[in-house]
Amino acid sequence: MRTFNYSKINEQKWDSELLSLIAAIYKEAGKQEMYLKQRPEELEKLVEIAKVQSTESSNAIEGIVTTNTRIRQIVEDKATPKNRNEQEIAGYRDVLNIIHESFDAIPITPNYILQLHKILYSHMNNPAAGRTKTVQNYISATYPDGSTKTLFTPLDPFETPTALESICNEFNRVIGNNELEPLIAIPIFIHDFLCIHPFNDGNGRMSRLLTTLLLYRSGFYVGKYISLEAKIAKNKDLYYDALGEAQNGWHEGNADAVPFIKYLLGTILAAYKDFEDRFALVETKLSALETVRRATMNKIGRFSKQDIRELCPSLSISSIEGALRKLVAEGEIKREGNGKNIRYFRLK
């Protein structure tokens, strides 16, 4: 089994691209703190939107889906799960809520990770919930013709408990002693977690929940307002490519985690940029029509009503719908499709 130790990583010389990403994230985090003091109530509305998006997107990556209406109802705890998919979605909601409310009281230890995994499956009867894997698992790709290919073989079940404890201990040591920049230590922890693949099921979702937890504990709260999971889902091929590249040589202890570090930092920075864009729309008091007009100007190509709602958290759905109708009538945007397939695009 490979050894988990950050000493070699700590001695590594980082390239200018990676260092620029870290510097930019710190700059954006400082701006976010200032923005939250200026418009706390309006920006708080982003939280519920992000929760829905995070729950929907993280599950969708794994093929766990339901309707948009049911997702919102389940995340808002206004509906009882009707099937296995909805039970898994409800479990993700529960873990995400715990992280939002108590991140500073959740130490990074195997015991707490196992507890979170148990909660992930708390709405269904899963005997493996809260336990490390009992059978060997594989990271595979499925191709359009139905064929599959094993991309990576994680650790054996008997090695897993010790490995999970090792990465937790190492992470806590380097963070506690200020030995390594948190924005480097966090992606490395998540990368190791995914290489171990400690559970029979739920590893991908747990990795994304732990990413949010680790970022919060290090003072990076963007995931509370902008869904990191939605950004990963939108470009999941890049996610898998970066992970696959970083996994080469992992068992031998000579993997290069930099591709995955850069991918995750780029995703975090993009979320901060989105937050800044949304703040710009609530910074000055504008009419609903002008707010929606400015929001549409931020969109390239086709967009949905939900896309505009994310940019205009201070407006009600009815206000957004009314503004979109006026913009269509005035010839600024065009509407196409029907029902939930309605899309808009700008004409000017």
Image (cartoon, rainbow, N blue to C red):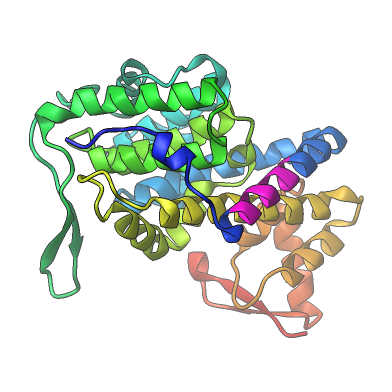
- Of residues 37 and 333, the one nearer the viewer is 37
Q: Residue at x 75, y 62 (%)?
A: 322
Location of residue 324 with respect to 345 vertically, above or below: above
Q: Where residue 266 appears, x then y in whole percent?
A: 56, 56
148 relative to 255 in the view: left or right: left
Res 122 visible: no
Q: Which quadrant holds the N terminus?
A: top left
112 relative to 151 in the view: left or right: right
Location of residue 49 with respect to 310 vertically, above or below: above
Q: Where residue 163 appears, x then y in whole percent?
A: 24, 28
Snapshot quadrant of residue 114: top left
188 relative to 88 in the view: left or right: right
Q: Where residue 342 appears, x then y in whole percent?
A: 55, 71
Location of residue 212 with respect to 272 vertically, above or below: above
Report the span colored magenta: 19-29
120 relative to 74 in the view: left or right: left
Please say whether residue 330 is one of the residues in the magenta stretch: no
The overriding secondary structure of the stretch rendered in magenta is helix
Residue that protrudes farthest toward the right in the picture:
285
Q: Where residue 142 appears, x then y in whole percent?
A: 18, 64
